[in-house]
């Protein structure tokens, strides 16, 4: 894999709750230098017009982050505002309580509420927090309801849950479940070139990374 090819699979991510506007500006400059697919920042740092992000780098933000324990109406309002401020990709967290209870129809409704306010061609990625789900069946079910609700990607993790981030097993299972109909974003704990390439080999089509420069410079 060439460096530029790998870069176009990376969402360069800065979700530190204490990130300042100046740090976001530096981060966006780094994203431009690296040639990544997207910059992923917290919604309170939108819009990014002042940071001169090139047109070929998508602006991504998060919704219901990091817990997912928000009302669907609040997630939808957050997503709609983010889209109005220039976000073209939105990574939303599912309601883990509903998922843990097996209330998959309600998880689907939660995702669908966000999809309704950010229709295509905006990209909706659904964070299933795979390490926190009970078993493989729950991972499969989460992917299925995300697809049913109109998601474009399923994503492993927020990177903030105590259960952990992306695993090769979860990525492979997610990729098998969506079978190319959706993208698979691996995120949470990917800090080396080896880890990045392993996730891609497992089926990831996008990577969420804060250590993007370190990864790309190792290639």
Image (tube, rainbow, N blue to C red):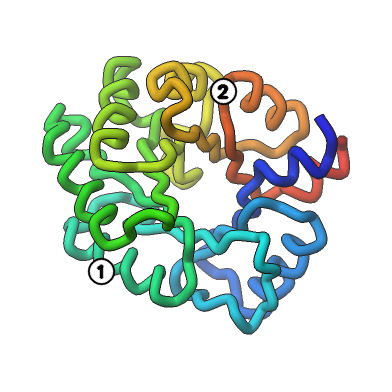
**Could you tell me residue 79's position as x and y percent?**
33, 64
Q: Is residue 61 above or below residue 51?
A: above
Q: Nearer the viewer, residue 201 or 27?
A: 201
Q: Residues within 10 Å of mark 1 (few under 14, many from 20)?
A: some
Q: Is residue 105 left or right of residue 115?
A: left
Residue appearing at x 48%, y 62% in the figure: 88
Q: Is residue 82 left or right of residue 212?
A: left
Q: CA distance from mark 2 to mark 1?
A: 32 Å
Secondary structure, mark 2, is loop
Q: Quadrant of residue 199?
A: top right
Q: Quadrant of residue 129?
A: top left
Q: Is residue 112 above or below residue 146?
A: below
Which residue, given by chain and number where applicable, does mark 1 sit on? Answer: 77
Residue 111's mark? none
**Could you tell me residue 165's position as x and y percent?**
50, 34
Q: Quadrant of residue 55?
A: bottom right
**Could you tell me residue 31's position as x and y percent?**
73, 60
- Farthest residue, direction front: 121
Secondary structure, mark 1, is helix
Which residue, given by chain and number where applicable, does mark 2 sit on? Answer: 203
Q: Residues within 10 Å of mark 2 (few under 14, many from 20)?
A: many
């Amino acid at each position: 894999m060439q460096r530029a090819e790998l870069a176009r699979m990376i969402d360069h991510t800065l979700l530190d709750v204490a990130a300042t506007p100046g740090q976001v500006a530096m981060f966006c400059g780094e994203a431009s230098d690296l040639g990544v697919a997207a910059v992923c920042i917290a919604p309170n740092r939108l819009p990014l017009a002042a940071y001169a992000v090139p047109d070929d780098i998508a602006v991504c933000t998060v919704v219901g982050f990091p817990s997912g324990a928000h009302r669907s109406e609040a997630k939808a309002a957050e997503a709609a505002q983010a889209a109005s401020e220039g976000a073209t990709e939105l990574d939303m967290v599912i309601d883990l309580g509903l998922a843990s209870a097996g209330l998959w129809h309600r998880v689907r409704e939660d995702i669908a509420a966000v999809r309704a306010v950010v229709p295509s061609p905006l990209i909706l990625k659904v964070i299933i927090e795979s390490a926190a789900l009970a078993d493989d069946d729950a991972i499969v079910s989460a992917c299925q309801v995300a697809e049913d609700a109109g998601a474009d990607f399923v994503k492993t993790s927020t990177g903030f849950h105590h259960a952990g981030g992306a695993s090769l097993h979860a990525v492979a299972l997610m990729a098998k479940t969506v079978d190319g109909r959706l993208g698979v974003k691996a995120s949470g704990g990917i800090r080396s070139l080896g880890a990045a390439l392993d996730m891609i080999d497992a089926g990831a089509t996008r990577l969420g990374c804060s250590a993007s420069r370190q990864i790309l410079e190792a290639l």
